[in-house]
Image (cartoon, rainbow, N blue to C red):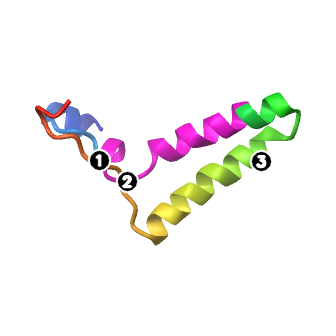
Amino acid sequence: MIRDGLFSETPLMLYREIYIAAVVVGAGVLVAVGDAGAPAEAAAMATATGLRMAAIRWEWSLPRIRPGEA
């Protein structure tokens, strides 16, 4: 990420691969399941890991926003 910042490029982990999206979904599961009173850590970890593994298996990626589109 430092290299990308120095060269004014969007970091790979923010757009191409599903890293951060899996973590955000896992955090949402942690909050939702935790509020329900169930063991939330295992559910969140399974969700984030499963999403990441599915993204690798089926080559999912996030769309890239081009300059001027936002």
The residue carrying mark 1 is 12
Q: Magenta includes 18? A: yes
Image check: 9 left or right of 54? left
Q: Which residue is drawn at 80% across and 32% down?
A: 34
Residue located 15% across and 40% down the image: 66
| Mark 2 or mark 3: whose residue is earlier in sequence | 2
Q: Mark 2 points at which residue?
A: 17
Q: Which residue lies furthest to the bottom in this view?
A: 57
- SS at badge 3: helix
Q: Give the range drawn in magenta.
A: 13-31
CA–CA distance between discs 2 and 1? 7 Å
Q: Where is residue 4 in the image (x, y as percent from the top left)?
A: 21, 39
Counting residues from the N terminus, which is met first, the one under dot 2 or under dot 1? Answer: 1
Label 1 is placed on what type of residue? Leu
Q: Which of marks 1 and 3 is nearer the N terminus?
A: 1
Gap in angstroms between the C-alphas marked 2 and 3: 23 Å
> Are there few (<14), some (14-19), or many (20+) residues within 10 Å of tag 3?
few
- Please identify the dominant SS of the magenta region: helix
Image quadrant occupied by the N terminus: top left
> Relative to residue 70, is residue 62 depicted above or below?
below
Q: Is residue 63 magenta?
A: no
Above or below, 33 against 22 in this view is: above
Q: Is residue 63 above or below residue 7?
A: below
